[in-house]
Structure formats: structure tokens, C-alpha cells
Amino acid sequence: MFERLAVLLQYVLPKQALTALAGKFASLRAGDLTTGVIRWFVGRYGVNMGEAANPDIGSYESFNEFFTRPLKSGARPLAATDFICPVDGAISQYGVIDRDQIFQAKGHQYSTTALVGGNEELAKQFENGSFATLYLSPKDYHRIHMPCDGRLLSMIYVPGELFSVNPVTARGVPGLFARNERVVCVFESEDGPFVLVLVGATIVGSMATVWHGVVNPPRPGRLREWSYEDHQLRYSKGDEMGRFLLGSTVVMLFPKGMMRFNADWVPQGSIRLGEAMGERQ
């Protein structure tokens, strides 16, 4: 009953307005008020400031500056493996893509085509491939890094809903990750293409990439696409590629035969940036 009510509430809340308001608040430079909010947040969610490059809570001028804080050097050593985990967080789901269907939760699947904004040609490259859905909680480090070496091919902004992203909505909102606002980043590696999808949610003020800066806002309500094939933008395993300003979930897609996940990966298990994720097949 509680879960049903929680999901129904998601349909009636003014999610866009709440998110816009949260984004404005997070960018405010309000002195002692900002410091007080950050201090409360650190205590409420158990944020480990000892890992931050700057552990001084009082020095952050805005909540966004705190939320996207970099880690100190050496805080996340990279495993000697082909594919590393690109974020701190938890494994929501992972496994094989069934033709074009990605498992969300019991009774719920969504298509790769819907996830990448309707691009059937792009989606077809991941038919019967593999996927991983990684959730970043409030306490986590919110920058996203490269799971392997790659050259950027394109980026697609897909407008959408802003449902909260958590186990309750994953079980209760059909096609959640293919309905929410998202930024699709397409890369080419020596083993084939791969995709990182940054999925927004209620209160997620914006998403940014290192090559573009803030992608949203603005929120024009239409799909936008950028091609980088002529730019030769190459990133190495472990390089930062983007960040959430109040943030959510990353969905990764790999083609069939490119990689296999580590045997010790389990749904809902915690993960850390730089840990071993998988090996080439």
C-alpha cells in the first residue's frame, strides 16, 4: 500500500517546478545559510569529507560547489582490469539485454531504442549486449568517470519526466529510465561502441559533461543532438566525463561479446569508482 501511494504521488507532484526551484537554491551563494545546509546534509547522509580534495565545509560558496566536490588525489585507485566502475553508488541491475529489452525490476522492462531517444540505428548495436544500471545516493561522490578508454562520437539530450529514482519507483513506474530526462553519451573504443546514459530525477537540477559544460537547463522540451566525430575527443579509463548537480543514475550499454561483468557483482551491492567491473570477452 505504501509503495502504491508513493508512486501515485509521483504522478501528481509538480516535479518540473520542484526541480527548477531546487536548482536555483543549490546555486545560491548565501554565506552562513549555505554552510548550515551543507553541514546538515553531511550529517544527515554521512558524507565522508575526509575523501574530498577540500574537506572544509565552510569554504564552499554554494551547495552545488559542495555536491560536485572533487576527491583528493589517490582516493580512488584504478583496478588493473579492462573495465572499471565509473561511479560511487549501488548496482540497481545489470546483465544481458534480451534482444532490445533492458530489465528494470520485476515485471518491468524498457527498450534500448527508447533509452537512447528513439535512435534505432544506435540501439541496434547493443542488441543482446549487456547493461548496468548504477544508482548514486546523496552521500556519494557525484562525478562520472570513464569505464574504459574511449573516443566521444555524439551526445543526445532527451527531454522527459522527472520521477524520483529509487527502488520503489523502479518497481512502480514502467519504463522509468527511458521516461526520465537524460543525456546519452556515445563512445567508440577499440573493442566497439559503448554508451553512458546520465538519467535525471526529481530535484536533479542539471547534468554536465566535461566537453560541453551544463547540458540542462535549458530544457527546451525537444531532443537535441551534438556530433563530435570530427573533434577527436579521447578520454582514458578513469578520466572524468561528467557530473550530476544533485543526481541520480547512470545506465551503461555494451554490445554483445564486448565485456563480461565480475562474478561478485550483485544487485543492490555497493560499488566505488575505480573498482573492477569486468573483463573483455
Image: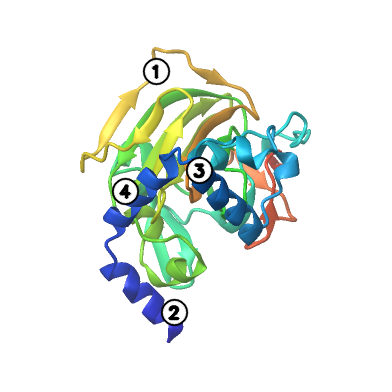
* Residue position marked by numbered label 1 in the rendering: 229
* Three-letter code, disc 1: Glu
Spatial separation of the CA atoms under disc 1 and disc 3: 35 Å
Q: Residue at x 56, y 54 (%)?
A: 138
**Mark 1 vs 3, N-terminal side:** 3
Within 10 Å of disc 2 (Cα), the crowding (few <14, some 14-19, many 20+) is few
Element at badge 2?
A: helix
- Is residue 116 shown to the viewer in this render? yes
Q: Residue at x 44, y 44 (%)?
A: 26
Spatial separation of the CA atoms under disc 1 and disc 2: 44 Å
Spatial separation of the CA atoms under disc 4 and disc 1: 33 Å
Query: On screen, 219 above or below 74?
Result: below
* Residue position marked by numbered label 3 in the rendering: 63
* Residue position marked by numbered label 4 in the rendering: 20
* Residue position marked by numbered label 2 in the rendering: 3
Within 10 Å of disc 1 (Cα), the crowding (few <14, some 14-19, many 20+) is few
Q: Position of residue 38 (x, y in %)?
A: 57, 49
* Three-letter code, disc 2: Glu
* Three-letter code, disc 3: Phe
Q: Are marks 3 and 2 in contact (CB under 8 Å)?
A: no
Q: Quadrant of the N terminus?
A: bottom left
Label placed on residue 249: none
Front-lying residue, 72 or 163 = 72
Q: Is residue 46 left or right of residue 194?
A: right
**Mark 1 vs 2, N-terminal side:** 2
Spatial separation of the CA atoms under disc 3 and disc 4: 15 Å
Q: Are marks 1 and 3 in contact (CB under 8 Å)?
A: no
Spatial separation of the CA atoms under disc 2 and disc 4: 26 Å
| Badge nearest the viewer, 2 or 4 | 4
Element at badge 4?
A: helix
